[in-house]
Amino acid sequence: MRGAVIHAPGDVRFETLDDPKLLHPTDAIIRTAVTCVCGSDLWPYRGAEPIRDPHPMGHEYVGFVEEVGSEVTHVRPGQFVVGSFATSDNTCANCRNGFQSSCLHREFMSTCQADYVRIPNAHGTLVATDEVPDEKHWAGLLAVSDVMGTGWWAADAAEVESGSTAVVVGDGAVGLCGVIAAKEMGAERIIAMSRHESRQKLALEFGATDIVTERGDEGVARIKDLTDGIGADSVLECVGTEQSMQQALRAARPGGNVGFVGVPHEVAVDGQELFFSHVGLRGGPAPVRRYLPDLIDRVLTGRIDPGKVFDLTLPLEEVAEGYQAMDERRAIKTLLTP
Amino acid sequence: MRGAVIHAPGDVRFETLDDPKLLHPTDAIIRTAVTCVCGSDLWPYRGAEPIRDPHPMGHEYVGFVEEVGSEVTHVRPGQFVVGSFATSDNTCANCRNGFQSSCLHREFMSTCQADYVRIPNAHGTLVATDEVPDEKHWAGLLAVSDVMGTGWWAADAAEVESGSTAVVVGDGAVGLCGVIAAKEMGAERIIAMSRHESRQKLALEFGATDIVTERGDEGVARIKDLTDGIGADSVLECVGTEQSMQQALRAARPGGNVGFVGVPHEVAVDGQELFFSHVGLRGGPAPVRRYLPDLIDRVLTGRIDPGKVFDLTLPLEEVAEGYQAMDERRAIKTLLTP
């Protein structure tokens, strides 16, 4: 089969690879329907994470079951399945608590920009649709496996409630999906922090009521202006830098909540500032598995359309261009078709 | 009148001071019934906080109303009142959200180890009891004005629920009151981290089911042993050091919560560790005003007896000895009687 391999910052190649095989009775092999490039793939691509040896890339997928291990009994070959970037047995104590992305047997996916993929913990990870969905929904379901699930988690962790005010820091695909989630959870006012016209437009289409282009202290001051001087009930931090985290914490009102889903890179939170802010903080890798049945339903019924975050579609063999377009911010997110 | 003044680390003196006067229409003057020394008073006493000029001390109080400003209409001279270390108008947006200790007009109390005290924002801060309570309840009501309110907030911020497992880090008066709160909120298992026999005994009396004497990594390992390997649902951080915060965060399970109420001193929380822990974190000065009616009722009906944290009672003029006894850990908390 063929798939993407990263060799060095800026150097992603499309190569011939060994076909994946079942290694454990809980594995499944799927044929990728569509896959994509994630904002977090740009960390190593930009040299912000070390690349020790060349390795495959990709952790987002929807596809057709090819083969299952003996303990994978809830899906069968031919079915269309949606999963998560973090696999889970869905039975351990952390899974039962709803934190499947902290499953005691968790394995992070990392080989999905390819024709075929081995899914560890398939028994607890994959959810099959009732029938093979119309192709128009594939992009939306793909989004559910990561960015939409993560945007939902950001809003959930930030405790967005009906009638509340939510701020979304970060206008990447996750932030935009965070806008969708905040809207679905009933936020009355959704303030998207963005300075890119195409992203602002999509944020407004997804339900944002206000756009703030300022950043840092000015951005925080603007949020305060819009929230009677006290800050927002909920802030979704969808970037992962020191600046974005600080902006998020300072934009929340006393007693408000920050849900942070951008993997923090060199971020330290000052204990005393957090203390006097009265802001609640929760983050982590999204427990996508918890949300899958609900989010799949919202996509298939047309209630949400997170597939719109893909504004560039390329054949899988052009994966390198997919990275480059996102790196140069020519694309929000690249869909790849095998 | 007479009151305590700190001059330098280790140097608290009992001096003659000017009687307090009403400065604003929202002020009240109270005659102190009982007051006390707080664990946080030990920070400057131990030189961990700078002392620029000699200044009065104390932020815990219950007493009798002497005089009220024109806008203080809900209490009248002669009534017995309970307040909070943080004053609040109880009407601003933050107060309405239940975070009175972030009131837009907040003033922290700082002159309460004295015969008389001026209470700013008395209209939104003081709660009068129906009648003058029996003296046996004064210590409990005094605890409510700070340490019991703070322990309650720690358990609330840590989202203690019926049937859950709670860990209390810190065996000072606040931690011990945290045990009371966790018990009242229905925690099934309450693990107190303490290595002092008298404090262990009180923790058990207040409802702790387990005592852990280990600290740091060993303490965390012990908590994991007691919680099926995953950690506790709720952790109450009642100290405020880097070590205690780290211990608290690592003792919580994925999806669990840490309520932190010890004022953090040189504490930085690593963003990436917090991210992958999936732990929710909320802290701050306790919104005691929110809890006052309920906690006063629990004390007066004898449901809780947080007054037991006072294991040393001294006349106010011996306030210096009160500090010293706590500094040397001869006393958990010193009650002072004017």
Image (cartoon, coloured by chain):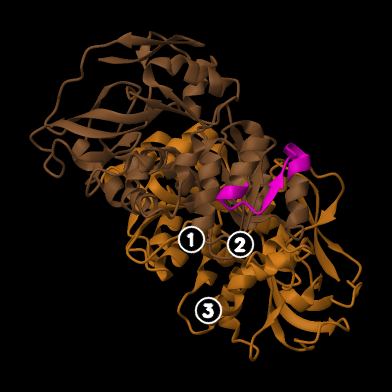
Chain colours: A brown, B orange
* Element class at badge 2: loop
Q: Residue A113 placed where, x, y %?
A: 35, 22
The residue closer to the viewer here, B16 or B77, is B77
Per the rendered image, the range of residues in magenta is A204-219
Above or below, comparing residue B31 to residue A310 in the picture: below
* Residue type marked 2: Glu
Label 1 and label 2: CA atoms lie apart by 30 Å
Residue B266 shows up from this direction: no
Label 3 and label 2: CA atoms lie apart by 41 Å
Q: Which chain carries label 1?
A: B
Q: Residue at x 70, y 71 (%)?
A: B61
Estimate how packed mark 3 is, as few (under 14), some (14 to 19) or many (20 or more) residues with alpha carbons within 10 Å: many
Q: Tell me, yes or no, whether the two marked residues, 3 and 2, touch with CB atoms within 8 Å.
A: no
**Residue B125 inside the magenta-drawn segment:** no
**Residue bearing the label numbered 1:** B155
The residue closer to the viewer here, A89 or B47, is A89
Q: Which quarter of the figure has residue A328? A: top right
**Residue bearing the label numbered 2:** A188
Q: Residue B42 placed where, x, y %?
A: 67, 50
Lateral position of residue A165 relative to residue A109, left or right = right
**Residue A212 inside the magenta-drawn segment:** yes
Label 1 and label 3: CA atoms lie apart by 18 Å
Q: Residue B41 placed where, x, y %?
A: 69, 53
Estimate how packed mark 2 is, as few (under 14), some (14 to 19) or many (20 or more) residues with alpha carbons within 10 Å: some
Instruction: Specify the label residue B28 is tagged with.
Output: none
Q: Which of marks 1 and 3 is nearer the N terminus?
A: 1
Above or below, comparing residue B260 to residue A59 in the picture: below
Q: Which residue is drawn at 56% across and 57% down?
A: B331
